[in-house]
Amino acid sequence: MLTSPEKPCVEYLLTLNGKKTEELLCATAVKDSSQNINIRIVTKHANHAAILRFPSYYTISKTDKLVSLQSAEDIRIIDEHSLATAFNRRGYTFFVGSARRPYEPYINARIEELIVMSVRITRICDKDRTEKLESRIDMALTCGNFSLRTNVVSLAAEYDRDSDELIVVFQTTEKNENVACKYNMDLVDDALNQIWNNCQNISYKSSFKAS
């Protein structure tokens, strides 16, 4: 066992709304450019997920237990969460994983309800100071011949800092096809920025279709 007398072990309390989370299925963590620790957690039955942000150990009073000051919970209609990777890049923290959720274009167009298992990349700003991490953006990733309505999960993912590329391994839920795709992170960032800008330009009234 490796220990460091100069830096005692720090316990991160994984709580939501002041309550201890149930047994976890998986988690992934990454330090951001502001020295915060960002942890994405998935609960035991994969029906609940959240991002917790903890302040730097050295910016608060010396204690062996840290509580998250910011958090972003996934809405309850999303389930079957899994995690593939987490990384930090140019002032943003990213998470890659998959989950089962309603197909948004159909919901927005009020066509029908379609539940799809999809791979997503999530981005939050390192300088976000809001309690609910309101800079969070989620975007679906597709690969090869898969459409956004194909049920797929992320088996693995890795960010290569040298090439600034993200590699994601997809598998159909029927487990009859596996594909790996590589994404240029500048293009991913451009797409996420476009989503953010579009959201800022939509008024409350225009987000509803006239009945």
Image (cartoon, grey):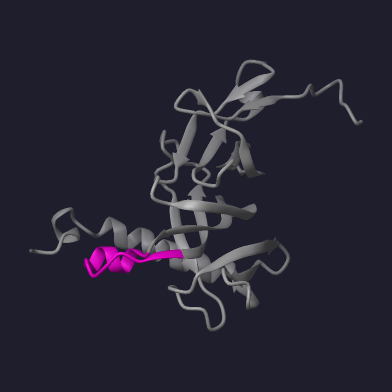
Q: Is residue 94 visible?
A: no
Q: Residue at x 50, y 70 (%)?
A: 151
Indicate the position of residue 183 as horizontal and vertical percent values: 60, 72
- Residue extending farthest to the bottom is 145
Vertical relation: 102 (above or below) 141: above
- Residue extending farthest to the right is 1
Q: Residue at x 61, y 44 (%)?
A: 33
Indicate the position of residue 115 as horizontal and vertical percent values: 39, 63
Vertical relation: 132 (above or below) 157: above
Please state the extent of the stretch shown in magenta in the rendering.
103-116
63, 145: nearer the viewer: 145
Displayed quadrant of residue 184: bottom right
- Residue extending farthest to the left is 211
Q: Is residue 113 magenta?
A: yes
Vertical relation: 108 (above or below) 135: below
Q: Is residue 82 visible?
A: yes
- Residue extending farthest to the front is 174
Displayed quadrant of residue 171: bottom right
101, 142: nearer the viewer: 101
Q: Please give the count of numbered marks on the rendered protein.
A: 0
76, 209: nearer the viewer: 76
Q: Residue at x 16, y 59 (%)?
A: 208
Q: Quadrant of the N terminus?
A: top right
Q: Quadrant of the C terminus?
A: bottom left
Vertical relation: 74 (above or below) 182: above
